[in-house]
C-alpha cells in the first residue's frame, strides 16, 4: 500500500515538474529579446567576458583559416570559412551594440 502511495506521489511530482518547466519555457519564448538580454546581463555576464570569449573565438577561426595551420585546405574551403567568419562577426557586433544600448538604458 505504501509502495502504491509512493508511486502515485512521485508521478504527481513529475507531472507538476513538467508543467512548471513548460510554463517556464513558454515565458522565456514569450519574453521579447531585449528583456531576455537584460535578464542575461543581470545574471552576471559582463561585456568584458563576452568580448574575451569573442576574441577567443576569433583567434580559433584565424588559426583555422591560416595557411600555416592547414596547408592542405583548398581555396574554396577558405573562402567559405571566411564568409562564415564575416557572418559571425556581424552577428557579434549586432549583439554587442544591442547589449550596449540596453546597459545604457539601465544606467
Image (cartoon, rainbow, N blue to C red):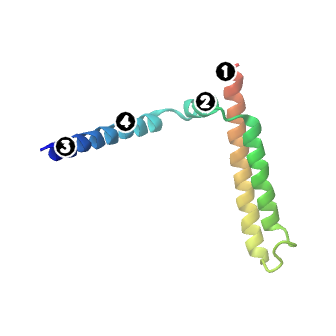
Return the mark for residue 23: 4
Q: Nearer the viewer, residue 35 or 17?
A: 17
Which residue is denoted by mark 3 in the rendering? 8
Q: Secondary structure at mark 1?
A: helix
Q: Which residue does the image show at 73% across and 73% down from the upper left?
A: 77
Q: Quote the CA–CA distance across marks 3 and 1.
A: 47 Å
At mark 4, the secondary structure is helix
In front of the other: 88 or 12: 12
Tell which residue pokes out farthest to the right in this image. Answer: 68
Q: Position of residue 40 (x, y in %)?
A: 60, 34
Q: CA distance from mark 4 to mark 2?
A: 20 Å
Extreme residue toward the top, this view: 107
Q: Earlier in the sequence, mark 4 or mark 3?
A: 3
Q: Nearer the viewer, mark 3 or mark 1?
A: 3
User: Tag 4 or tag 1, which sits nearer the N-term?
Assistant: 4
Residue lying at the far left in this picture: please name it: 1
Q: Which residue is mark 2?
A: 38
Q: Earlier in the sequence, mark 2 or mark 1?
A: 2
Answer yes or no: do the residues labelled 2 and 1 have beta carbons within 8 Å? yes
Residue designated by label 1? 106
Q: Report, in whole angstroms, how far the alpha carbon at label 3 lies from the one at label 2.
A: 41 Å
Residue 63 position in % (x across, y down): 82, 64
Amino acid at each position: 500500500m505504501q509502495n502504491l502511495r509512493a508511486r502515485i506521489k512521485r508521478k504527481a511530482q513529475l507531472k507538476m515538474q513538467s508543467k512548471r518547466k513548460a510554463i517556464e519555457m513558454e515565458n522565456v519564448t514569450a519574453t521579447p529579446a531585449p528583456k531576455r538580454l537584460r535578464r542575461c546581463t543581470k545574471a552576471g555576464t559582463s561585456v568584458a567576458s563576452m568580448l574575451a570569449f569573442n576574441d577567443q573565438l576569433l583567434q580559433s577561426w584565424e588559426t583555422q583559416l591560416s595557411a600555416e595551420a592547414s596547408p592542405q585546405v583548398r581555396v574554396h574551403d577558405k573562402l567559405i570559412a571566411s564568409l562564415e567568419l564575416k557572418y559571425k562577426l556581424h552577428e557579434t557586433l549586432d549583439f554587442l551594440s544591442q547589449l550596449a544600448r540596453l546597459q545604457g538604458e539601465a544606467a
